[in-house]
Amino acid sequence: MRLSRRGLLRAGLAGTAATALGGLATGCAVPTGSTGRNMVLWYWSGGLSDTVVKNAKARYDSAVDLQAIQIGGQYRSKLITTITGQAHIPDIAGLKGEDMASYLPNADQFIDLRTLGAEKYKSRYLTWKWDQGIADDGTMVGFPIDCGPVAHFYQYQVFRRAGLPYEPDDVSKELNTWEKFFDAGEQLGRRVSGAKLLTDVNSVYDNVVNQGSKRYVDKDRHFIGDQEHVRRAWDLAVEAKRRGIVSDLVTGTPDQLSAVQDGKLPSQLGASWATFDLKNGVPKTEGKWRIAQMPVRPSNNGGSFLSITKACREPEQAFEIIAWMLNAANQAQGYVDAGLFPSTPASFGLKQLQEPDDFFGGQVTTDIFGPAAERITVAYNSPYDTALGQPIKDEIKNVGVLGKDPKNAWSDAMSKCRRIAKHLGVSY
Amino acid sequence: MAVLEQTPPAVAKPSPTQPKKGWRKYWHLYAAISPFYLLFLAFGLFPVGFSLYLSFHRWDGLGTMEWAGLSQYQYLLSDTDFWNSIGNTIIIWALATFPMIFLAMVTAVMLNSAVRFKSLYRVAYFLPNVTSVVAIAIVFGSIFATNNGVVNAVLRGVGLDQVAWLNTPWGIKVTIAALMTWQWTGYNAIIFLAGLQTIPSDLYEAARMDGAGPVQTFFRITLPLLRPTLLFVLVVSTVTGLQSFSEPQVLLQTTTNDSTFAGGPGHSGQTMVLYFFQQTFDNNDFGYGAAVAWGIFLVVVLFSIINWRLVQRRGE
């Protein structure tokens, strides 16, 4: 056979076309869920303990081929894209806490875990955390992974120098209201030159809102961000600014980190996972920190869930796996590997959580976070919450950073909320 | 190639099946160019069409779509945040582009007359353009830090007040613009350099013979002949500048609690594309996000028309 250039080209093109068509054909027949032994689990880096994932793979090896995939980048976008596209949907999917509000209205995309016998595990988990995984219609979408109890981190020596209570128990007891907390801030500023209690007004505002049992939109799709609970958080944030106990720095910037390191920002209200931010951001402050309860009552920040999607062909098997992966012993492992604070109170007493932490001067941090986790109340989190909370957060930031007049800022925030509420079909 | 080797059909007897015949005859040519069109269809045209469809709906990205008619666009027109983001984008674009063009031109003229290490300089100037924006933004965040930044250290050194660059509306815009200038100056200098090298050297010789100095030569010969290049640079800068996203996002992101698309205090650094991301991915308002995207499209079209008019006028 004579090999002409034309012949080669034709052959090449035909080959390409065949491959493309083949690709299209398989593309049309993509599996929408597990096939045979495959069981696909999606999570993100740090979302689950790698050890537990590995153990689960080995443990259920005789029944399924568990493929745990760490999805990088925009996790939620990728998950909803596959669900909407009805292709390659994972059997088990991790759901981030901050995204729950947007998943719950679409509970029909997931299997109701109650039908798989989830109820009998309920007593082993934090009640508020358990309830966060349940949609308005009662469908249980998410099985609790971790939670993020918020506590008060402070630098022992600086508090001592400022004449403030400095032992964790005393700090918890004596700085137990915002009023006393702010007084302490003023005293700190007087005694330690240049020191501020908190980084910005938003750390007051957000924490006060998070402590409450209401947020911006209620179950009836009504805007409640103009009510007393938000107004109070706003007023406290404004007061913190007025009394000069917040800095003009931005969290996470080099300026802020150096102020923290120098003891000019000796106090933070952070969730359990913030211990890792501190250890990475200001490693030189090792041993200087202690943890106490935050003023008034603990709040929650973060924490995620595992779910079983509608595409899963063996939900019973999948549920058995997630219930095992998230039992008290494995949650303790998750705390060691990835800093995931357990949602199972039985974990708190285990060895892994009772290790003294040198970064916090040998304190057992679970002594604070554990009781905090059990006292948390959470608010209903509407899918419209982000959109309608943002204008208020933006405006309180303007007050804190740009020195905007609080009255104008509040009325600007409200008029913006009114506009957005109307757009989203939320009654005002 | 195949076309050339075929004898053309006789003109005398046109056959009615000719178009089909032609299609059959040339199928492999169509096949050869098809990969681009197929990929474009799937990943270019379809998403564009779908986003238009989406912009007439309400959708949270997961549930069922609801018909919304023109309401998304009505809201877009009255949305002060959107207009604010257009203003921010244009201000940042202008603050970045004009100094950048000036610096790029100066750099190009210097590169053109450099005798030693020519290629080294060219590579060095191009480097910022291929560096990850995220990495640059982190470095710029340190450079423009209020208390510990190099810029403020210099300001204090010469006896001026320090500026809270990343905490004031204008500081934010200037910082983003500085980042973009730094990133694009080298790239455009290379483009200008290519333009400079197309100018025949006899023109310069003639100018010198007529007694023109270097300044006159620049304004009378270099600049007019560089106009097409200048316009190209302007068009490219407009397209990239109107889409600025990573720069403000990385520069102004703070904590995980805060929206990374808010653009700093007072939304001062919120560009159009950041606003689009905020509406779509923070608020899960995909329908409105699509409408915002089309709003951005119209702004870009408007700027393209302005650019095109500039080219036309210069051409006359």
Image: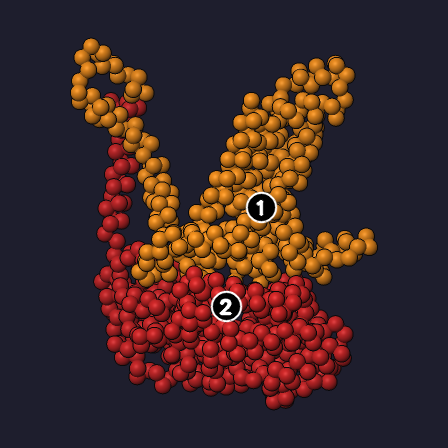
Kindly identify which residue carries mark 1: B90
Q: Amino acid at mark 2?
A: Gly
**Residue B226 in the image, given as x and y percentages of width and height:** 62, 26
Q: Residue at x 35, y 56 (%)?
A: B68
Image point (60%, 47%), residue name: B92
Instruction: Give the amino acid type for the residue marked by disc 1 in the picture.
Output: Ile
Q: What is the quadrant of residue A332 in the picture? A: bottom left
State whether residue B149 is above or below residue A291.
above
Above or below, A283 relative to A190: above
Determine the CA span between mark 1 and mark 2. 28 Å
Identify the chain of the residue marked 1, using the numbered disc in the image: B
Percent position of residue A277, x then y: 57, 69
Chain B: its colour in the image is orange
Q: As drawn, which residue projects farthest toward the top?
A: B12
Question: Is residue A226 shown to the viewer in this render?
Answer: yes
Q: Is residue A366 visible?
A: no
Quarter of the figure with residue A319? bottom left
Q: Identify whether A93 is placed above or below A212.
A: above
Q: Residues within 10 Å of mark 2 (few under 14, many from 20)?
A: some
Callout 1: SS: helix
Q: Position of residue A205 (x, y in %)?
A: 57, 73
Q: Verify CB contact (< 8 Å) between mark 1 and mark 2.
A: no
Query: Which residue, given by chain and number where applicable, does mark 2 sit on?
Result: A389
What residue sits 47% from the left and 52% below the top?
B77
Q: Say left or right for A49 vs B246.
A: left
Q: Which mark is residue A214?
A: none
Question: Which chain is painted in red?
Answer: A
| Mark 1 burial class by Cα count in 10 Å: few <14, some 14-19, many 20+ | some
Quarter location, residue A395: bottom right
**Chain that bears disc 2:** A
Q: Is residue B179 above or below residue B262?
A: above
Numbered disc total: 2
